[in-house]
Image (cartoon, grey):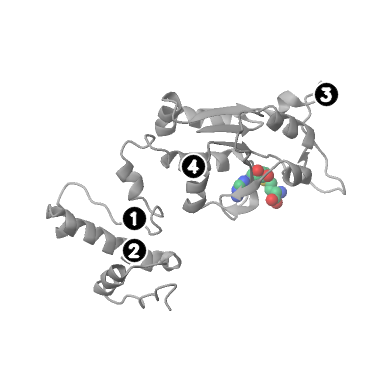
Amino acid sequence: MRIDIVSLFPEIVEGVLKASLLGRAVDEGLIEVAVVNPRDFAADRHRTVDDAPYGGGAGMVMQCGPIFDAVESLRGRNSCGRVVLMSPRGRRLDQELVKELAAAPDLVIICARYEGVDERVSEALVTEEISIGDYVLNGGELPALVMIEAIGRMIPGVVGKWESVDTDSFFHGLLGPPQYTRPTEFRGMKVPAPLMSGDHAAIGRWRRKEALRATRARRPDLLRNLTEEDLELLAETGNESPAPERENEP
Ligand code: SAH
């Protein structure tokens, strides 16, 4: 997969992309990432990329010209034509969207600064706006990196074992089950017996049940499309809260 990032601060992005699992994925060619700086496309000798907002008000707005030129310089590399703008008003990033983005052959991601971009960038250049949550950061670089790291986990080979991804929270629509490691007993607290049974079917069942229990306790909004077996497992956990109705039932 190829990702082109449009940013006034390449150094923020490049540091993270060199480190850890993501860095290795880039080294191994699993993800190809490049940063293009709109400032390199500024028309004047001061390399201006922003100006005061029409109508007045605080702060500066990123101008159309350098952003359009930066994105258009990527033509040919951006085969699917997806151009994302990181923006607090965008669609909220979640695992579904991450999976969808990971399936694209390439992406262009625009990181804004200051008060954001001239609206005509949204109107005529961008295909979608994405937010990482209902709060405001100083720029789109950290949001873009959050999104890229999540996309990276979906690309086979980036995380050593696919099973780690497959059991992640949200991957199958539920929170992940609790995890334990040595010792078997710590200050009187024991590792649940099924995990030590060596019986893979029992372990799988226990994990599904605990994933359901955790999801019901913390994120009941995620409990959708449950199977008959899920409902039985939930019933076994006792009724900490009422069992949810199965969706799409006649
Ligand atoms: N005045 C703008 C915020 C500008 S913050 C507003 O009220 O919406 C500057 C830039 O940081 C944004 O244009 C966006 O690119 C990025 N940004 C800030 N918070 C973000 C968030 N929650 N998700 C995605 N991008 C964000």
**Where residue 214 is drawn, which disc sits there?**
2
Residue 64 position in % (x across, y down): 78, 37
Residue at horizontal 43%, vertical 24%?
27
Callout in the foreground (3, 4): 4
Question: Which quadrant of the figure has residue 71?
Answer: top right
Question: Marks 2/3: CA distance?
Answer: 57 Å
What is the three-letter code of the residue carrying label 1? Gly
**Where residue 44 is drawn, which disc sits there?**
3
Up-down: is 145 above or below 133?
above
**Mark 2 / mark 3, whichever is N-terminal:** 3
Question: Marks 2/4: CA distance?
Answer: 27 Å
**Mark 2 / mark 1, whichever is N-terminal:** 1
Crowding around mark 2 (Cα neighbors within 10 Å: few <14, some 14 to 19, many 20+) is some
Question: Marks 4/1: CA distance?
Answer: 21 Å
What is the three-letter code of the residue carrying label 3? Asp
The residue at which mark 4 appears reads as 102
Question: Which quadrant of the figure has residue 220?
Answer: bottom left
